[in-house]
Structure formats: C-alpha cells, structure tokens
Image (cartoon, coloured by chain):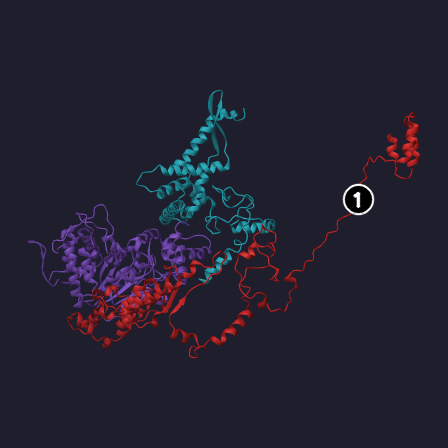
Amino acid sequence: MANNIRILNKCIPWYPSSYLLPRISGLLQAREYSRPTSFPDYFQNPVFRKEDQAKLIESSELSKIAALPMKPPAVYETSSVYHDPLVNKLINHVMEMGKKQLARSLVEKSFENIKRAQIERYHLATTPEAKAKIELDPKKILHKAIENAKPLLQLQPIKRGGITYQVPGPITEKRSLFLAIKWLLEATYEKERTVHFPKQFAWELLDAANNTGKVVKRKQDLHRLCEANRAYAHYRWQ
Amino acid sequence: MLSRSWRHLCRRYSQAVTFRTTENSPSQHNEKQEGLFYTMNPDLCKQLFGHGGFPKSFQLQTKTFTETAIMVRQPALDLMNCIRASDMDKPVIRYVLYGEKGTGKSLTIAHLLHYVHEEGYLIVHVPWVSEWLRRVPRHKEMSNSQTREGLVDLPLDAAAWLIHFKSQNQTLLKSGDLKISKDYVWSKRETTEAGAPLAALVEHGISRVKYACDVVDALVDELKILSTNKQCKTFVAIDGFNSFFYPLTRLNTPTKKKVKPEEVTLTNSFLKLTNNDWSNGAIVVTADQLAVPDDHQESYLPRYLLYKKGFEHLDPFVPIEVGRYNEKEFLCCAEYYRDRLWLRGPKEIETELKFTSACNPYRFMEQCAPL
Amino acid sequence: MSLFIRNYKPNSLATVYNTKLWRLNSTTTDSALKKDEEEEEFRVLDILKKRERFQRRVVRRTDIQPDRADRMATDQNWGNVWPGPKTFHPSSVPLPLRQGYVPKGQAPPGKKANAELMKIPNFLHLTPPVVKSQCEAIKQFCTEWPSLLNSEEAIEKHYPVEVITSDYCHASPTIRNPLARIVTLRIKLSTLNLDKHSKDKFIRLVGDRYDSTTDLVTITADRCPARAQNLDYVNYLLTACYHEAWNVEEWEKDKTEDDMEYYDWNNNTSKKALVNWHLQTKNENRTLNDDEYKAFDTSEIPYAEEYKNAVSSWFNDGESDATVKNYGEVVRKLFGLPEKK
C-alpha cells in the first residue's frame, strides 16, 4: 500500500497546484464544455500528459503559463500509460443519452473480443513469420482501421442554374475522422438482433484494419463517385 | 513441428523460474510453490470440469490461453494441510471458504478437486447452487415430488448433476467396489437391488430423469454409509452454498407460489450430506456474495451470507478466507498474463493496474482485457 | 454726470466739483440757491450705498462644565459610579464605546445620543471587583461547603442527578427568553438501583435517551411554559420510568431468544452441535433432549470454553474479520488441525 501511495505521489506532482496549457491545442485533446461551466474563458486547458509537460519544461514555456488559471482535467483525461485520445473520441461517438460508462464498457468489450480473436489466431499460426504479422494490440488495430476508413475527398451539393451538383472537393482532417468513426459505427449497427454490439464492432474493426469490409468499400465508393464527378469540380469556385 | 515444440519448451523452461512451477501434481504443492501457476492436464480438466466447475470468465480464459493454469494459493495449501492432518475416524470437518467477489473461491475449490482426485477421493461437487435455485431459464423443468409430500423436484438439474458426478468419478465407479446397501424400489418394474454397484444407481438416475432427484437422495445416503464404513473417502465441495439458506428462490410453482429453498428436494439431499454425522471425508463449501441477490450483498463474511440458520447448520466449521493477491502473487500473475499475451505494454503499467484493481484477481483480469 | 460719479471721492475734492456742478446747472435761480447753501449741509448722493461694516457678534459661550466622563479619576471606585442596573448613560461611562450598524468602511457612531447602546441591557454594575466585594458582603449569610464533597467523583456519587438549564441575555424588550424554560436531566444509569430485568426494561422505556457508550440517560423537557414546571416534569419522568422498570407484566414472560439483545451460547444450537460432535468422536450414540443439552457439562471437552467465547463474541460483538479469525483459530484447535500460516 505504501508503495502505491509513493507511486501515486510520483505521478501527480503537477496536478494540485497548476494545470498546464497544452502547447498545441490538439484536435482531440481540446476540452469543450457543452454547457457553461464555472470556468471563465481565460481559463486554460489542462496539460495532463506527462510527455506534454516534459515538452513544456524543455521548451521553457512552463514559466509563461505557470501563473495562468487552469481548468481541472476531466475524469477521462488521465496520465495513464494507456490513455488514448482517439479511444476517448470513439467512446463519445458510441455514447447515447450521456451514458458514458455503458459506452466505455462496450468499447472495451470490443477491444477484448479483438484481443481474444487475435490471440487465438496467433496460437493457430504455424510459422514465426505468420505470428509476427499478427497485430495483437487492439488499440493499434483501431488506429489502423480508422486510418483505412478515412476518406480523402468529399462531395458537396452546390446549386448552379437550378440544378444541384455533387461537387467533389478536399476534406478537412477533422471531418474525415468524423466520417470514419461514423461509418464504422453505422456498419456495426447493421447487424442481426442476436449479435451484440461488441462482437460486431470487433469484426468491423478487424475488417477495416485489413482494408476490407463494408466501411472500406464505402470509402472507395465515395472516392469513385468523386472521380466520376470531377467534371463539376470547377463549380466549387465559379 | 519439432522445432516449435522445442521452442515452446525453451520458453516454458526459461520462465518457469519466475512464475510457473513444473510441479503439476497438487499433492506435492507446498509453500515453495505459493503464488506460482501450475498447468492442469487437459484430459483431466475435461473429466473434472467438463460439466461445470470453472467460473465462466475463467473458462473463456482457458480457451484464449490454450491451457488451464491455476495459481497455487495459500487458502488451498492451508486446506490441503488441514485435510491431511484431520482424523478420518472423527466426524467430517466442514470448511467454509469466504472472501470478496472475484478473489478466487471457486478456483480454490477447483485446485482442491484436483488434489482430492489425485488422492483417490470420491468427489461430490456442486458447481454452483444458484444454477438450480436462482437461475430460471425459459423452460425450467419442475414437478412435485412423488415420494416426499410438499416438495419440489428439479429432475433435469438433478440428472445433469448426476452426469457431472459420473464423469468426475469415472475411475472409482468403473471399478465397481462400491455397492448399495439396501433395495430401492422406484416403481413396480424398476428396482435397484442391494449389492448393485453405485454406478447402476447413477445410471438409473440419468436414464430415468423422472427419478433423478430421488436417486440423488439415495446416492447421498449411500455415500455416507460407504465412507463411514471406510469403503471410500468422500470429498464434498459445494460452491455458492449460502444459496440454500436465502429465504426465497426464484422458482415458482405452476400455481404461482414462491418456492422456498427447503421445499426443493435437492436442497434437502445436500443439506443432509453436509451434516457431520458421517466420517472419512471432508466438506468444503463457499459463502459467496454472488449467490444471493444484489440487495443482500452488504458483507462477505460467512454469518451474514449464511444467515443464522446456515451458521447453525454448519457450526462448528473452519472459516478460511480467500483474500486478494499479495505482492508476489500479483507480480506472478502479471508475469503470467504477459507470457500469455494478455497483458502488453510498458512495465510500469503493472503498478497502475495494481492500484486500480486493488489486487483483486478478477478485477485485475478484467482490467487487462481491453489493453 | 458720469464723469463726476466716476471721480467722486468723499471729503477730499468735494468743493472743487461742487462749483463745477453749480456752473453746469441753470443760472436763473442763482440767488435763492445761494441762501439755501448756507443753511443746509449738502447731502451727497450716495449711489454706491457704502454700507457700514457690521461688527461681528461675539458668541457668548454659556458656562458649560466638561463632560463628567472626562473628569473621572482613573482610580475611582467604579462600584460607586454605577451601583446598580441602569440604562446606559454616555457621561457616566468613561469608555470610548461605539455601537451601531453602518455601511462598510465607516466607523460606528459614538456613545453620545446612541440609542443602540441604550437599548441593550448592560452589566456595567457587575464588574469583577464589585462582584467580589458583594460576595464578601453576603459571605456572612452562607454555610460552609461540605468537606466530603471535595472532588467531582464525590459530587457525582452523592448527587448523581444533574439538571441542566440555560439563562439567556439578548437584545429584546423582554429579558425572558423562551429557551430558558428547557430543562435537561442527566443521570448515569449505573447509579440507579436496577436489576438485570429492570435495567433492560428501563433502557427500552427511555429508548434513544440512553447512550450506551457513556452510560448516560438524558431526559429533556420543554413542553411546559415555565422552568419550574419542566423541572417537575423531568423528575416525574425519571421516577415513573424507574418504578415502571421494576414492574413485571404478564406478557413479558413470552420473551424469546430472538428478543434478547445478547446471544446465550448455552441455549443455542451451537452447544448442541458441539455436544453432538463430542459424542460422535467418542462413538457414543446418545440422543439428548433439550434440557440435557443445556445441562451438559462442556468442561470435559478440550477448548470448549474458548469455543463458547468465540461463538458468543461473534454473535454479541458483531461480525468482523477479528471475530471470524478468532473463531477459526479456536475451531482449528478443537479439531486438532494445524494453525493457519
């Protein structure tokens, strides 16, 4: 127990006094409140990752923000080794009616399913090369799946001369991430009633990570449509 | 193929020092092996636990890990010591395992079952009492007892248990040394005569499901007589024993009357078995919070869970606490999970997990799952 | 004309200008005017109306004595200045008092003409020296403190009943506070003359007024308007409870084991189990009835006494890790099993 406390102390010397400003307000780390909170605008977002804090100290920007007021980090913003902003994002997408605990358990359960499937595959594989190929980390699989599901182009409806044209154009990083997660979840929801979400989601993630499956096909369909509609591209600026 | 098994062996050997013990016979286990994992033979595992006995989550683990490994822990060693030291002429001693949820009471029983199987005991093992009294699938077979007035039979459950009993005691039953002491008349045509082997009685119960509960009752009587006469040693293990003493079951008669546990024939049989009016054996039961509804799980201590009635039924008994992992056990377990690829990542994660799981074995396993 | 006015200075150049003025006027009535000039003084037209400066009125101060408070000697006998209870008077009190509510940042008004100070009752007549001198004065009427009541314990022993009341001082037109009527009576239960049954009944009668940790019974009465009435009532309650506790009603004989607040091992199945176990180990097949079980002498069974204590403490002290562990150790000894490591 004493050991635990010592470690805890080691982990949190930053937190009680001041929460640090993130240097790059990342796409996923930024904290936005849906409702007005008790923190005024000039409160800075906390720096809760040890790596970010180390960066701040190295670049000696710490002194600049040491005196600024900071928001406290949310419960999911931890300094845990396994903290992953993308997973937090995914959990928020899965969540309905604010039931975060349920969403979290579902996502974790699907990770567990992925892990079990991969470990089984690992044991079935005969050669070391084949074993080395198998990715066992469910989080890496998630990252890969989302990377594969991200579209590069999008279609925008633009009205010209009374006719609405589907005009292809570039897509922002944020929207492409949004679409990838949305498509993954939509693909998962198209399941039979008897199959549970974690199982189906695990399959979808594994498929997408292998660059196959419904989601990747949907992305490719979109790309194909963009290619077909490239004649309309000039409507974007005319 | 050869190279693979060689590699496998190498790996096993290299890590045997840290978290595994090569001593796979529980009767040889002692304090040296405490906190280490030993691997159970898959065939034996199928024989002992083919029809239940492991918790569901552990069963899933064995499938994922492609082996059945159980940690040698202090409560099991303690119980083995006690069983070895106890005087077999005296009435049987009752041991009550208790502890928080997920600390490994059922796995301690599993370890002990392996031990007594090696020692040549006759095993009477009830995997989970709540399976009979609290779990109500859509088609729960229930009927009024023919022989005992006002009681309820659970013929399918009883038959399933008889199959479990048969598979656990294959060798002993096959030898046919165990004979029945008196005649049992089931109906006009069906009787089991005195002197018939015990296996015949069990077979009858399995083939004629209608009489399964009565067969269980008869079996209990016979076992008591047999072991008192030193013809066999009997080991009784009942998981979730406190379910027998919770005031109500979830069962309903066709007339929508709530059934109390003492109105079930199986309950009576097994309560009869846990009396200490026989000798040459040992009884291990668990008091488990999970065997009673959520609103009666305030404490994990045995008297709260067993109620006064259960306490008086078992008294005097030896309470044995199954606790959380200690330092060494936790490290071994983490090491084992790493070996089985269940836990990955930097080394310092273990301290974090130790803190969040509070060294509770089940919680630790669960928290490792999504990582 | 304007020239004249501008340059007019009284007394100095009056004559010069007068002649000039004369010339400018008509010359027809010259002789008549000459006659007047000699008779009357010439009145100067005072256009600027130079006013005479008023002499400032000298304020006549009345002969006021300095404030009495300022004249008081520092070593005076205060008891003579303020002998009895009296409304506050600023001149009699040589203290720089301030009293009253003001907006933040301002000083409260001083003592003079301050109704706030006059409203509240004061205790200026009860300064410690005055109290001391008055005590000295009435000492001749007092009896001596009993020499045997020289310590708290002695007082507690001889006067176990403790009556607690409160007096209040507050700023309202009346000096009577309704809270002053409340009377609390406190007594240690052990000082009452009660036996096992009556003690149990007394505790049940007083209910949550009894605190088992301090062994105190606390009875509070506030239902009557006067303190004396409440005091009577509290005394009555204590007396009534005490005598009622000694009464044994017919229905009290129906009390069963479960109603008891303690676990009696001798009456319970735990003893039966132990005796049965003991008989079985000796291979005696006797069946005893309830009375025989109760009468069975357990001293011949080794560790029976410890076992009894362990079970009783498990039931009476509540279930905890310690009691369970203790029970386990004793049972292991009873069965002759090895100790837990």
Quadrant of the image occupied by residue C337? bottom left
Inspect this view and state whether residue A37 appears: yes
Palette colour of chain C: red
Palette colour of chain B: purple
Palette colour of chain A: cyan
Out of B153 and C39, give the one closest to the viewer.
C39
Question: x and y percent of residue C153 in the render?
Answer: 41, 75
Q: Amino acid at mark 1?
A: Arg
User: Which corner quadrant holds the N terminus of chain C?
Assistant: top right
Which residue: 46% across, 47% down?
A84
Q: Which residue is mark 1?
A: C53
Figure check: B6 above or below A71: below
Q: Secondary structure at mark 1?
A: loop
Inspect this view and state whether residue B29 appears: no
Question: x and y percent of residue C17 in the render?
Answer: 91, 33
Q: Chain of mark 1?
A: C
Quadrant of the image occupied by residue A200? top left
